[in-house]
Amino acid sequence: MTEGSIHSIESMGLLDGPGIRAVVFFQGCRLRCKFCHNPDTWAVHGGERMTPAALADRLARFAPYFDRSGGGVTFSGGDPLMQPEFLLETLRECRKRGLHTCLDTAGVGPKGFDPAPVLALTDLVLYDVKHWDPDAYRALTGLDIAETEAFQKAMTAAGVPIWVRHVVVPGHTDTVESIRALRGYISTHLANVQKVELLPYHLLGAAKYPPLGIPYPLEGVPAMDRDRCLALQKEVFPEYPV
């Protein structure tokens, strides 16, 4: 029987897709992003073990809230692609129950993973563009950009709607020139983009690192000014107001 490892479930999320959403945080991520605020989800093992049907049954309890708000279920992490068999079966169970599904992902699963079956059962992708430059992407995440760009092609082939997200980090990607480069990358690499959101870098995950014995990679970098981030959004992506 297929089982997966779930870090946690947030029952009333308002920032992870349309409407009121249940957000399921999967264990597992191959990226080691310098600004990661969930390092406790990196390991695939750990958390609560669940079957797809049991998870879908729990999520279906919130259906009245989903129906009233146009919401649904968002699978996040970690990265939900890191448990592809469990994710696929859970998506099937959610579809049986009429639940809108969304993937919050950076587009990197296990090596050799074919995302097509998963995307065929996904209603929306919140796609995290870590960086557009191959060297900067590797420096930021520890992996080659080719894997996430293969996922971009799979999303285009599937025709799935996309909301792009990008974390803006002071001293790294907080200039107009950087965000314009992001816009150019989106226009040449992604199709079916419905929304672009610039997210201000924050320090909420920094306290998780010392108990795990991991140095915080962006020690000393301040949180991104929210007003400055909003100004960048309005200047470079005026068609996607936040």
Image: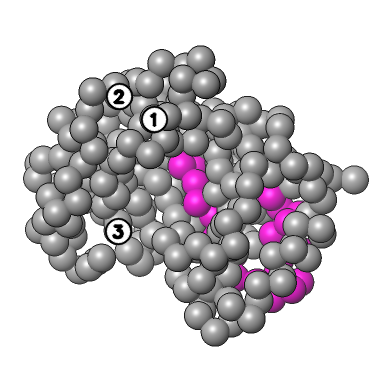
Q: Is residue 164 magenta?
A: no
Amino acid at dot 2: Leu
Disc 2 from disc 3: Cα separation: 25 Å
Q: Which residue is mark 2?
A: 218
Quick check: 214 left or right of 116?
Answer: left
Q: Amino acid at mark 3?
A: Val
Q: Nearer the viewer, mark 2 or mark 3?
A: 2
Crowd band around label 2 with a 10 angstrom C-alpha radius: few (<14), some (14–19), many (20+): few
Disc nearer the start of the sequence (1/2)? 1
In the image, 237 versus 207, the foreground residue is: 207
Residue drawn at point x = 47 percent, y = 29 percent: 208
Residue drawn at point x = 22 percent, y = 28 percent: 221
| Residue with the mark numbered 1 | 206
Residue drawn at (69%, 50%) of the image = 87
Magenta stretch, residue numbers: 87-107
On the rendered image, what quadrant is the C terminus found in? Answer: bottom left
Report the Cα–Cα distance between label 1 and label 2. 9 Å
- In front of the other: label 3 or label 1? 1
Label of residue 107 in the image: none
> In terms of image quadrants, where is residue 239?
bottom left
As helix, strand or loop, the secondary structure at mark 2 comes to: loop
Reading the image, the residue beneath label 3 is 196
- Image location (x, y in percent) of residue 2: 84, 45
